[in-house]
Image: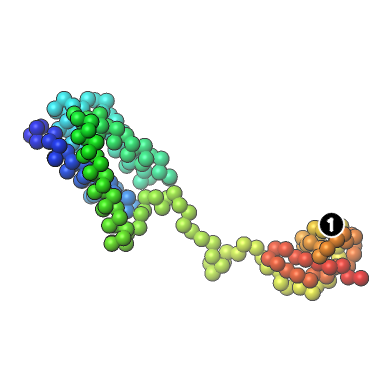
Amino acid sequence: MIEFLTDPIVVTVLLAIAGVGIVLELFSTKFGIAGFIGVLALVIFFYGHFQAGLAGYGTLFLFVGGVLLIFLEFFLPGAVAGTLGVAALILSLFLAGEDTLQIGVSILIAIFISIFVFFMMIKIFGRKLVLFNKMVLSDTARKEDGYVSNINRTDLLGKVGTALTVLRPAGTMIIHNERIDVVSEGGFIEQNAKVKVIKVEGARIVVREVK
């Protein structure tokens, strides 16, 4: 059985199953059957190589640490734990392999199959990537939902008030006991001068002195 589990073809199949399982979990909100099968394939891989004397306890600890980090990725924000977990898994695979070239080819084939399944899930099945959505702000502040970037005070157009401060050109005016930040149309306007609102551009309120 150990000879069978360490056969290059069997190793490639096990790694491909593990890769596909991890990819499918990227589209799931929690750890499920696909992830369990993927981890089981890795456990079988390391069991065979450990019994064959190719993998030591250090390699096993690295493998277990990688699995735990990937598992924690489903509960932690960002993708740091998942990235470190995948890196630890790949390193442990190389350390467990008898032939570096052979294990490298097996890993490349498994990655290729996993990428193929990944694009199939998106392009053909229309699935959305759940895991990396935690890294991206997808919410938008829409006007329909009551969000506005600023209050448009078009109601002030044509109103006359008093310059509460000197406008050079920015300052404050008062209209009906309301303090409003304004900008003069051109130059300097003295304090207490009569000013009229002539333009409203979002939060920018432009005034002109009334002679």
Q: How many marks?
A: 1
Q: Residue at x 54, y 62 (%)?
A: 141
Q: Secondary structure at mark 1?
A: loop
Three-letter code for the amino acid on which mark 1 is drawn = Arg
Which one is in front, 178 or 111? 111
Tell me which corner region of the image, top left, top right, bottom left or bottom right, holds residue 50: top left
Q: How is the image coloured?
A: rainbow
Q: Is residue 31 above or below residue 172?
A: above
Q: x%, y% of residue 176?
A: 81, 69
Question: For the view shown, which residue lies furthest in the left direction?
Answer: 1
Image quadrant for the N terminus? top left
x%, y% of residue 39? 23, 41
Whether residue 128 is situated above or below residue 51 in the rendered picture: below
Q: Kindly identify which residue carries mark 1.
A: 168
Residue with the most extreme right position: 211
Pointer 1 local density, CA inside 10 Å: few below 14, some 14–19, many at least 20: some
How far across and down, in percent of the image, does residue 41 sit?
Answer: 19, 41
Q: Residue at x 54, y 69 (%)?
A: 144
Residue positioned 17% across, 43% down in the render: 13
Quadrant in the picture for residue 147: bottom right
Q: Is residue 105 above or below residue 167?
A: above
| Residue under the point 90% across and 64% down | 193
The picture quadrant where one finds residue 65 is: top left
Residue 138 percent coordinates (x, y): 46, 57
The quadrant in which the C terminus is found is bottom right
- 112 to 180, vertically: above or below: above
Whether residue 56 is visible, yes or no, is yes
Q: Relative to residue 182, is residue 107 drawn left or right?
A: left
